Image: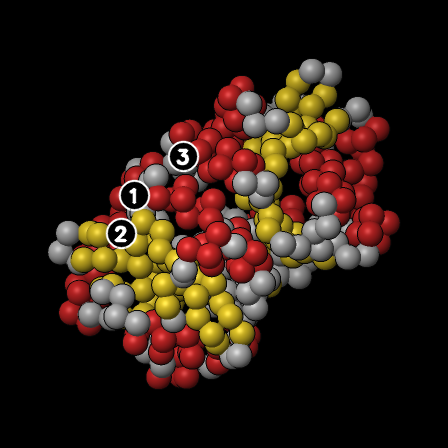
Amino acid sequence: MKIASQDEINRWDELVAANPDGGNALQTLAWGDFKGRWGWEPRRYVATVGGRQVAIQFLVRRIPLFGEVWYCPKGPGVSKQSDLIELVAQIKAAGTGAAFVKLEPEVLESSVDRKKMTAAGLVKGARDLQSKSTIFIDLTSGEEGVLASFNQSARRNIRKAEAGGVQVEPVEATAANLETMFQLMKATEARADYGLRPAAYFKDYWKSQIDAGQGQLLFATHEGDVLAGLFVTFIGTRAWYKDGGSFAIKRELQPSYAMQWVTMRWLMQCGITSYDTVGVPNPDEIGIGNARQGLYDFKSKFNPEITEFIGCWDVPIDARKYGLWLRIGERAASKLANRSPEKFLY
């Protein structure tokens, strides 16, 4: 593993899209630069793993008492346990100066042998930072095929929204539209009580990814009223439902179903083949009152199959500092996030 050259940084998003996992929006240049304005320093590396080049973006933060904490959001870009273990050895040998490194690759939970992970020096993280489980929508069959793959309820609600006059369109990233999108999310947060970062945080990365050609904002409207909004981000042939929100008006028109369907159609026109709806309960949490059960109930109407990844794993570099972090730092970060969402560490 070596520090990326300037030429590699100039081609960074192209390299990320070519990673074995197909690339991830949280590994892009725009995302790293954005996080660089919010307390993290992006550091970019390339490695050869399993005979393939992998572009890896770490976010680095210096924390008193602990030194440098390294976090690789939705990376490194490998999809097999053997490649991950090979890469961990390279990270340890690279002399990064990190106290520990947090990884969250999209390696399937069902494919790993945890004993081998532990033997390689990996430790399951105290908590998962990004969504561990998700639902993918395969967009390769075209509009008719994709629509036919939804369950009857989803198709009925899409037709109801269309018949009721709901309009869904991509909109420009004007200051007014960005503010409206945040207010839509605030309205949803008030109903679900999950906590939001500051408006400036969201507006910064929405604008950054849109300017990079990797994001789009869409609104659902009816007779002049904005009902719902969605921000989608994409790289290569993959896309992610990053943010969504709605006002508590005219919900009987089912604008959220129309929003998802038009978004998928728009993505297909852009050459996207895989749509990640981001964030549902893990398979063993379905039907037991999980706080995200409602997300599954909605998203499963488009595809009931949950894809579960391994979540966050740590690579301790300095054992003493890592142990101290688990005893003090992680607890403090978790409590702070629960008490003041605007102060999320990660």
Q: Residue at x 13, y 56 (%)?
A: 65
Q: CA distance from mark 3 to mark 2?
A: 17 Å
Q: Verify CB contact (< 8 Å) between mark 3 and mark 1.
A: no
In the picture of the structure, the residue carrying the numbered disc 1 is 39
Binning the other alpha carbons within 10 Å of mark 1 as few (below 14), some (14 to 19) or many (20 upward) gives some
Q: CA distance from mark 1 to mark 2?
A: 7 Å
Q: Using the rendered view, name the quadrant where residue 9 is placed.
A: bottom left
| Disc with the residue nearer the chain's start (3 vs 2) | 2
For residue 200, the mark is: none
Q: Of the residues tagged 3 and 1, which is closer to the observer?
A: 1
Please indicate whether residue 50 sits to the left or right of residue 149 in the image. left
Residue 258 picture location, percent across and down? 73, 36
User: Which amino acid type is marked by label 1?
Assistant: Gly
Q: Using the rendered view, name the quadrant where residue 79 is placed.
A: bottom right
In the picture of the structure, the residue carrying the numbered disc 3 is 201
> Residue 198 or 154: which is nearer the viewer?
198
Q: Secondary structure at mark 2?
A: strand
| Disc with the residue nearer the chain's start (3 vs 1) | 1
In the picture of the structure, the residue carrying the numbered disc 2 is 61
| Disc with the residue nearer the chain's start (1 vs 2) | 1
Residue 325 picture location, percent across and down? 21, 60
Q: Residue furthest top?
A: 224
Q: Residue at x 69, y 36 (%)?
A: 259
> Residue 27 or 226: which is nearer the viewer?
27
Q: Secondary structure at mark 1?
A: loop
Q: Is residue 59 visible?
A: yes
